[in-house]
Image (cartoon, helix red, strand yellow):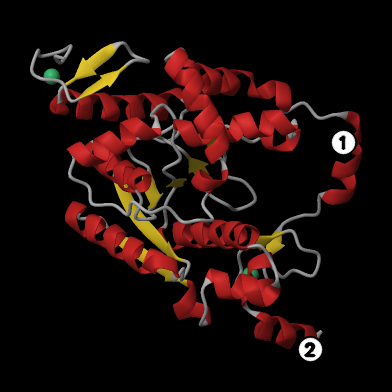
């Protein structure tokens, strides 16, 4: 197997693209695919400041590597959820910080155990919420805080083609139209929240894993048991079986959807009716100042994580 470009021994065969590549040209391929997605979906420009959400896993660290190699202005942040199982949070934080240091990228850390004295599992147990719903809300909030603290124009996450295609597959199977309307790799800035983008949407999990190995990126191999990656595992396996049969299907499936997403964004009559009732104006949270639509002016993060301050405010009212 020889590299299509230079003829040297190839390290990877990309059936969807009908090519084999040597390490050097594979790295170039991955960086070019990322640049293509950034341009195709108008994610950001060269002068923008990008905040990368690093988890210590291969996708987010590869993303940080690619964006810095492409010459973008990048900062990073790590959210420490305090997951003790197999030392997940401790190890992933160390890997994320070490890689940022190696790349000369500033990395802010937001630690739940340091801020609130407990991690996500303990908090979920105490409140009898599922870790996933609590984790989603907490991460979304802290991502917005990080972008504000870093004065970044846009937040970039390491979701890859497999993640996006599997989520699309799952949402189609359920005909979850509200999610199908929101699966675009770019979410515009709104209500005072920053723009969010997924620059790795043209790259598969296998390609990113290979990139991380070729580039010598040291990442956590063990995935958080609550992660999206784990949630859509069955859908990923089925998509991979189809991909094996017909290379390139995954990319056509997801990219075709992004071209047709407007079909899911047309509101049905009952959605329009609901909208009038639901939409209350955004205002700054009385405790933290982040935008919230909650009627009592306390955001869902503060309501959960800062109960003492909520009590104080309620007492004054
Ligand atoms: Zn080559
Ligand atoms: Zn708040």
Q: Position of residue 247 (x, y in %)?
A: 42, 15
- Distance from label 2 to label 1 (Cα)? 37 Å
Q: Residue at x 43, y 44 (%)?
A: 156
Queried on whether the Cβ of the residue with tag 1 lies below 8 angstroms from ligand 2, the answer reads: no
- Helix, strand or loop under label 2: helix
> Where is mark 2, residue-wise?
315
285 versus 38 height, above or below? below
Q: Are marks 2 and 1 in contact (CB under 8 Å)?
A: no
Badge 1 crowding class, 10 Å Cα cut-off, few under 14, some 14 to 19, many 20 or more, is few
* The image quarter in which residue 260 lies: top right
For the residue pair 50 and 179, the one nearer the viewer reads as 179
Q: Is residue 168 placed above or below 223 in the rendered structure?
A: above
- Numbered disc 1: secondary structure: helix
Q: Is residue 157 visible?
A: yes
As drawn, is 170 to the left or to the right of 112? right
Q: Quadrant of residue 261?
A: top right
User: Quick check: 100 left or right of 85?
Assistant: left
Q: Is residue 73 left or right of residue 236?
A: left
Q: Check disc 2: other Cα within 10 Å, few if <14, some if 14-19, many if 20+.
A: few
Residue 105, image quadrant: bottom left
Residue under the point 20% across and 55% down = 104
Q: Report x, y in % for residue 178.
A: 73, 37
Q: Quadrant of ligand 2?
A: bottom right
Which residue is under mark 1? 272
x and y percentages locating residue 270 in the rendered image? 91, 35
Residue at 45 percent across and 34 percent down: it is 43
């Amino acid at each position: 197997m020889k590299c299509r470009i230079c003829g040297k021994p190839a390290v990877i065969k990309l059936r969807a693209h009908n090519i084999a590549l040597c390490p050097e040209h594979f790295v170039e391929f991955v960086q070019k695919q990322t640049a293509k997605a950034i341009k195709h979906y108008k994610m950001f420009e060269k002068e923008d400041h990008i905040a990368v959400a690093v988890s210590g896993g291969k996708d987010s660290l590869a993303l940080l590597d690619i964006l810095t190699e492409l010459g973008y202005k990048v900062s990073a942040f790590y959210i420490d959820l305090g997951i003790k199982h197999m030392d997940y949070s401790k190890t992933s934080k160390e890997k994320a910080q070490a890689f940022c240091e190696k790349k000369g990228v500033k990395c802010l850390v937001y630690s739940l155990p340091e801020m609130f004295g407990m991690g996500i599992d303990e908090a979920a147990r105490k409140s009898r919420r599922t870790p996933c719903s609590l984790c989603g809300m907490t991460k979304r909030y802290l991502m917005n805080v990080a972008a504000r603290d870093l004065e970044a124009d846009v937040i970039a996450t390491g979701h890859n083609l497999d993640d996006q295609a599997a989520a699309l597959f799952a949402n189609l199977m359920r005909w979850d139209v509200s999610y199908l309307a929101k699966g675009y790799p770019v979410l515009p800035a709104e209500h005072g929240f920053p723009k969010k983008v997924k620059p790795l949407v043209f790259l598969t999990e296998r390609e990113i894993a290979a990139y991380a190995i070729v580039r010598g990126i040291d990442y956590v191999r063990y995935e958080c048991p609550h992660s999206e990656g784990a949630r859509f595992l069955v859908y990923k396996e089925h998509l991979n079986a189809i991909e094996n049969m017909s290379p390139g299907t995954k990319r056509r499936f997801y990219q075709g959807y992004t071209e047709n997403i407007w079909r899911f964004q047309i509101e049905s009559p009952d959605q329009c009716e609901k909208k009038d009732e639901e939409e209350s104006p955004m205002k700054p949270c009385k405790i933290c100042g982040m935008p919230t639509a909650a009627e009592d002016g306390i955001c869902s993060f503060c309501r959960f994580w800062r109960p003492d301050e909520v009590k104080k405010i309620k007492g004054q009212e």
